[in-house]
Every structure is written in C-alpha cells, then in structure tokens.
Image (cartoon, rainbow, N blue to C red):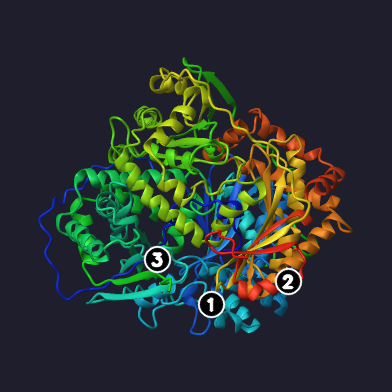
Amino acid sequence: MILMNIKNLLLGAVAASVLVACQAETKSETTAAPAISADKSPALDIKFDIPYEEFQLDNGLRVVVHEDRKAPIVSVGVWYHVGSKDEPTGKTGFAHLFEHLMFNGSENYDDEFFKPFEAVGATAMNGTTWFDRTNYFENVPTPALDMALWMESDRMGHLLGAVTQEKLDEQIGVVQNEKRQGDNNPYGMKEYRQLEGLFPVGHPYRHSTIGSMEDLSNASLEDVQNWFKQYYGAANTVIVLAGDIDTAKAKPLMEKYFGHIGAGPALKQHKAWVPTRENDTIEEMVDPKAPQVQISRNWAVAPRNDVDATYLTLVADLLGGSKNSRLYQALVYKSQLATAVSVSMTPFELASMFEVEVMLKDGADEKEVLRLMDEEIERLLAEGPTAEELKRSKTSILAGRIRGLEAIGGFNGKGTALARSQLYAGDTGFYAKTVNWMNTASAAEVTEAASEWLGQGYYQLTTRPEPKYATTEAAVDRSKGLPDTGTLPDLTFPEIQEATLANGMKVVVANRPTVPVVTMAMQFDAGYAADAGRPLGTSSFALSMMDEGTATRTSLDISAELEGLGATLSTGSNLDMSTVSMSALKSNLKESLAVAADVVRNPAFSQEELDRLRQRWIAGIAQEKANPVQLALRTLPGLLYGEDHSYGVPFTGSGTEASIGAMTRDDLVKFHSDWIRPDNATIFMVGDITLDEAKEALEATFGDWAAPASAVPAKNITEVAMPEVGKVIIMDKPGSPQSLILAGHLFPSTGDDNYLTHEMANSILGGEFTARVNMNLREDKGWAYGAYTFTLDARGQRMWLVYAPVQTDKTKESIAELNKEFAGYLGDTPATQEELSRLVVKSTSEMPGQYETANAVLGSLLSNNRFGRGNDYVPSLKGQYETLTIDAIKAAAQDHIHPEKLVWLVVGDRAQIEAGIKELGLGDVEVWDAEGNKLQ
C-alpha cells in the first residue's frame, strides 16, 4: 500500500486489531452430521443491487461502468490480475515493490503520480497488492476524468522508460522500511509462520506479499522490465468506472486512452490448490513485542468462488462475529479466560484462509481455553446453527455490505465489488450470486460446509510474550501533456435543518437518501477532559460500559437485538466529546432507536460487567505500551500540558492500569449523572430521513428525558506556556529495528479563527504526502515509510506533532534532516505561493467528493458542534481557502512553529541511538523505560 492516514494510524482503537488468515486440509475419516433441515432459509428483505454495463476493447481490456449521479465524481479502479502468488523463487515482494514504482513517474509524466490528482482535489487515492491482484484507484471530479485516464494509461502503456536505478533503489528502501514497520508491531512476525505452516513448499501462498529483505535488495531493473511486460498488459486488466459516468461517455474515452496498449502475453492461470492435512500441526513462537499469549488456529478452505466460501463466511460470524457468537460467549463472556476472540474467513483464488484467533487473559489456563475452543467448534459441526443464529448472522453481514455500497470506490465501494467479480470470476455480476448464496443458505448447507473444511486437520500457532526473562493507433498526442480538466465542480452539501425536542434537546438533520440507512450520533460535551478530578480513563470506560447492559437488557440482549435489526451501535470519547453512534436500516429505525435510548438513558453499570471489562481494558493498556506509536501518545501529552491539565492524560483515552484497577461502579454512575444528560447533548441524524421523521422518532425515545437539577460541571481548559528550550526522551526498546520519532509542542486550538491559515502552514511543511518532510525522509532518503507533521484536534490548545518511524541506523541523521527542513521553512526557504496555490486547489477541488457518504457529512456536523462553528462552515470553506495569502501563511509558521521548543520522544534501541542523539544538541536527554519510568 502506498499511503497511510496518519491520524487514523496514531489514534487507532485501543481494542486489539483483528488479523486475518486461515487454512484447512482433508482427513481420511469423516463423521456423519446429524439430520438438519435442508430447506432454504426465507430470503431476508434486503435489497442488494449494483447496476452496470460492460464492454471489452480489441486489446482484451475489460471495462465495467456503473452510473451513480449523487456527486460529481468518478471512481477509477484499475485491477491487474497479478499478485505475490505470481512471484518466482528468489523474487518475493516484487509485486508490491512494482506497485510502488508505478507511483514514481511514467515516460510522458516523469514526476510524483499524486501531483496532478492533488491539484484537482482527487480523493481515495491508493494502490494495494495481495496474493492474487494489484490494484490502483482514485476518485476524481468529473471534469478531471480525462486527466485520470491519461495518467493511468500512461503508466500502463508507457512506464519502463521512466524507471531508473535511482528510483528502484529508493523504493526498495521505502518498502523495506514498510516491512520493518510491520514486523516491529506486536505479532508482526506471525504471518510468516502462519503461511509457511499452512501451505506446503511450492504453493504460491507460502510467502508473504511484503517479501524478504534479501529478495527485495536483489531486485534489478531487468526484473522490473520483465514483470511489466509479462503482467501489465491490457488483456490482464479490469478497469471499473463508477459514479458520474455512463457507457456512452466511457467507451470512447477508454478507446482513446487505452486502445493502443498491447494485450500482453497469454498467461497461464494458477489452478485452485487447497492443501490437504490429515493431522493437526501445533507450533509455538516467542514475540518480544507481544503483550499477551495469542492462539491462532488456521485452516486452508474452499477458494473464493466456491459456494462453500460464502457458507464459511457465515460460520466465521457464528463462531466469533459478535458478543453472541459461540466462542466469544465461551471464552470471553462466561469463562473470562480470553480478552478477545476473532474469527475470520478471507477469500483468495487458490485457497481461502479461515482463522480463529484468541487473545488469552494473563495467567489463563491454556488447556481449558483449547478445550472450550474444541467443544464449541465440534458442537457447531455436529448440531449446526439455530434458525435465530443463522438469521442474525445473515442480517449483520449483509447490512454491513449495504453500508459499504454508499461509496462508489475506495477499498470497499461498489466499484470494488464489481471489479472483484470480473477479475476473479469472469462474471461482473458474481457479487450478486454470493449475496444470494448467503441470503438463502440453509442450516444444513452451512453445517455441511463447516464439517467438510473445519473437520480436517489445522495449523495452530501459539505466540507467547518473551519471558521477562490487438492494438489501435495511438489516439493521443502525449507530447502535449495532460488533458485540460476544465472547470472543476463545486461542493454539493445537503441542507442542514434543526429542531428542538420537548425537553429542549437540540436535533440536527441532513437528508441524504442514497441508501435506506440512517446514521445517528448523540454528542455530549464531556470527553477525556471531563476526567479531571476522577480516575483517568473514566470517560472512555463509562462510555464503553453503557452498552454492556441496562436496567432491562443484558449486554447479550443488546447485541442480539441490534444484530437482528441490522443495526450497529458504538460508544466512545475523544478529548472533548463523548458520543453514542448508531447506524440503522430505515425500516427498523424506531426499534433501533429504542435500543439506543435504553443504552443512553439507563446503563446498569453492573459490577459483574465492570469486572469483566476491567480485565480486558487493562490488557488493552498493556497492548498500547507494546506499540511504539500508542506508547508515545500515552506519554507525550503529560510532558506538553503538564499532568495537572485536563489534556495531560494518555491520548488513547484508556487511563492507566492503576486508575482502571481502582475504578468503582460509583465512579461510572457519577460520570453518567454529571455528563450524559439531555441538557448537555445534541443529536445528529444523516441519511434517508427528513426533519419531521427524525423529530417524531426522537420524541418517542428521548422527548421525556429530563435533566437532573444539578448544573453540568465546567471543564477548565487553561492555556499552557511552552518551555523556552526543548528536550529529548529516549524510551528504550532493546532490539527494535526502527526508531519512532514523535516530537511536539503546543499549537492554537482547532476552533481558532485562523484555523485554516495554521493548517495550511503545517500542510506545506509536512502535512501532505508530497510535503517537504515526507519528500525528504521517504522519497529522497528512503529512511522512512512515511514522515509527517500534523495536529491533533482539540477545543483548547492542540498538539503539533512531528512523526517519523525510521530505520534504527538513521535515527540521528533523520532528526538532523527534520531540523534542516524546519530551519529552511522558517528561514531562507519559506512557504511559496506555488505551494499555497497547489494546496488551495487541492483542498477546494477535493471537497465535492469528500462528503460523498453519510458518515462524512455526520463527521463535519460533529466537528462544527465541538468547535463552535455554524452549520454553514463546510459550504463556506471554499471561500475561506481562496482568501488565504502567502504572507499570512509565513506569519503563522513564524508565530506557531518553534523547533527549538520541541519535546522529542524517541522510542527505540537506546544502545544504538543515544550517542548520536546527544551529538545533535537538542537539549537535555532523559532515558525512560517502556513503562514510562525515568531511568536517568
């Protein structure tokens, strides 16, 4: 993958992430399943349709067109039927390395691929590689479609002349840093063992897509040329155009830009190869970064186009898809031997992968965990699912897929569904067949598939923490450069309407009837800052407890009811706000709101659930400390704001082991009484709903909710002075292959009147992929997978941060390069009018596609409320951007960026980096351990 969302990376959920993998094999003996009804289940009343047209050019290029006029944007998805499974021995990682090279210029545009796209406000730009495919995609304003097709066709048909040894060496370094970054995470080495344990020697899936360091280092220009000529021909490609486009317009454009490109050689397709395994294989590994024991049980199962792959998706949900799933019930809820359970079914062409992953509670009896795992899996294979279970899983999975269809492109939009169907099945409508398989699957069919695949031998890996001890004539004259994009469209933003409930609670509604779904968020003015005077983590912990049971519903009742309604509900806090969010099918809105209202108004905060969640929460804090980024975010706020300030808390919101360990039910009840109340709340609804419909539904569920007599507590967010000089803290992680550099100082509030000026001053320096910092450390030096400067939103002063995970032996040099960039930006090479103009065009041009989904609109409304902005803020942004001046940007940089006052937090191997850091003279150098204890 070429890009990352840095804020999402840094502020990822505390909950352990779900890793996907799987396996299976055949046993010589089988056990007959009991008689289970083979009648098809009644089809759920869920509409799932993506209209499309398709055609093929004479050179074999397949094109699919989906028309969706809701926004003036077009998604362009280019899918090449080549992935890491096609790599020969000694060339592992090459498919992904080649993906990176595709972004470094082509023969007729030898520059960074993103630049012309940023100039027109393109969004959702990325490229990814996996076992079976490599794909590239972007959403562009409709007038920029010619430009996008020119760029995609230029790198498809005219790449090799622009690939140099220098570019290859640079991207080898970038990919190797990406590999280091992944390997340096907890359980980061697990995938290599899984694939080698699951697939035999010679199987195309036996090695990981990222490849080996040695193979990457040995990649040559000859390899690049051979790979391109072999696999990047037109006949091996599917292109999907989705959005503000139709076939009548698409066909001549595709002929014009792609018709002259060669088909490429005829390729021999791999045949499905599901390894057979007669016996179980059980292995162990030690991971120094792992905070707790993890058991991963894997099967190789039916290929993605087999009906059993769909049935096994249901099996995964039945076993581990929710709180009501069988393994979650047995291992997390009842026995409390595990802190998390996930079950995943990941489809691939040759063989899919089915994985059961269990995170063990510290000190848990592993034999008992395995006994319960075996018992629940065997029970499902013997008895099959109940009718209620099966219906709930179908509804939950299909409702999730419907939500994804609101987007036209990106990772999971409609264009992606069509592309996968055509690329893997040769049938663009294949997605509908899989939906029908799932919708009508009977208990007998699901049980038979589970018995066939999970009844065979498995590969199990236990990861333990380290002990403390035909072508046309060219139709385009490419010498003339990029096509003119013309006039770019303006933002179309839904009308925002407001109302007030009988109890005085404010309601804000945006009608966006794209899909029959309503998204709601109830925002309370609380957040981590409301933890002042309470145990750290109270806000987040209380919000997490709210859906763990009410006066009349248990945690499992809530989960089951929402699944049955096809609804999702989430609770959480950020620095300033606490929010309860829900997504519901419109047809089930009233019933879904009734559950949400019960959660908000009547949380039980039962001692039993508190104790259960407490153990998982403390385990989550341990995982945060094992992750360099989250460890830094736990530490830096206290250094910048001071521990007595409301913001001087871990920015993960999770508190500390001590504070959570001491948390009482009274603490949670008191927090809810003080902050979760109607006179401190605003309700937002976006989607297929009008203001009158929203008000009627909300009056029925919240209209009689009365505020307590006491006043809402006040939050004291005082301004903090910055230190006169900076300092350095080295957090020692012996053996770390990377150093995480995270430096920061305070910066004006997100709600400041000059917010856009401040943001633009940061963006030019380090806030964009093509900004100065990333171009230096990633593209020029190849020392980091990505390096950025950015801010974290806050109603009071926010943090301005410098982020650079770099290879250990370049730690000193990377910090020196960062300071060189800062000095130049504030000195002889300040922001230029060209840089400002480029970012203004990018920011204004991307707005029409930026608010495509209901969640995006909802997010803007929540931000407006948090930072005191009017509902016209987003429509007014274009005018605000266009009035920015370069003098104001330069002044903002001088006033608010102070490298000499930075607090540098470097997480890495002290033995290798300390001496070099001291030579830089950044200020006093302290050494801390990974727990945040000062060593010297």
Q: Examine the rendering and report whether any part of residue 109 can be seen.
A: no
Instruction: Give left or right: position of 688 versus 637.
Output: left
Q: Examine the rendering and report whether any part of residue 183 can be seen.
A: yes
Circle nearer the N terminus (1, 3): 1
Q: Residue at x 31, y 39 (%)?
A: 607
Query: Which mark is nearer the camera, 1 or 3?
Result: 3
Q: For residue 746, which numbered disc appears in the image?
A: none
Instruction: Give left or right: position of 475 versus 274.
Output: right
Q: Amino acid at mark 3?
A: Phe
The Cα–Cα distance between marks 2 and 1, rounded to whole angstroms, is: 46 Å
* Residue with the mark numbered 3: 348
- Measured as percent of width and height from the top left, residue 903 is found at 70, 56
* Residue with the mark numbered 1: 265
Q: Is label 2 in a helix, a strand or a loop? A: helix
Query: Which mark is nearer the camera, 2 or 3?
Result: 2
Closer-to-camera residue (800/618): 618
The Cα–Cα distance between marks 2 and 3, rounded to whole angstroms, is: 42 Å
Instruction: Give left or right: position of 464 versus 152.
Output: left
Q: Residues within 10 Å of mark 1 (few under 14, many from 20)?
A: some
- Measured as percent of width and height from the top left, residue 45 is found at 32, 38
Q: Is label 1 in a helix, a strand or a loop? A: loop
Instruction: Give left or right: position of 373 versus 35.
Output: right
Q: Is label 3 in a helix, a strand or a loop? A: loop
Examine the rendered structure and indicate whether residue 912 appears above or below residue 612. Answer: below
Q: Residue at x 15, y 55 (%)?
A: 383
Q: For residue 813, which numbered disc appears in the image?
A: 2
The Cα–Cα distance between marks 1 and 3, rounded to whole angstroms, is: 24 Å
- Measured as percent of width and height from the top left, residue 876 is found at 71, 32
Closer-to-camera residue (901/889): 901
> What residue occupies the far top of the structure in this picture?
502
Q: Amino acid at mark 2?
A: Glu
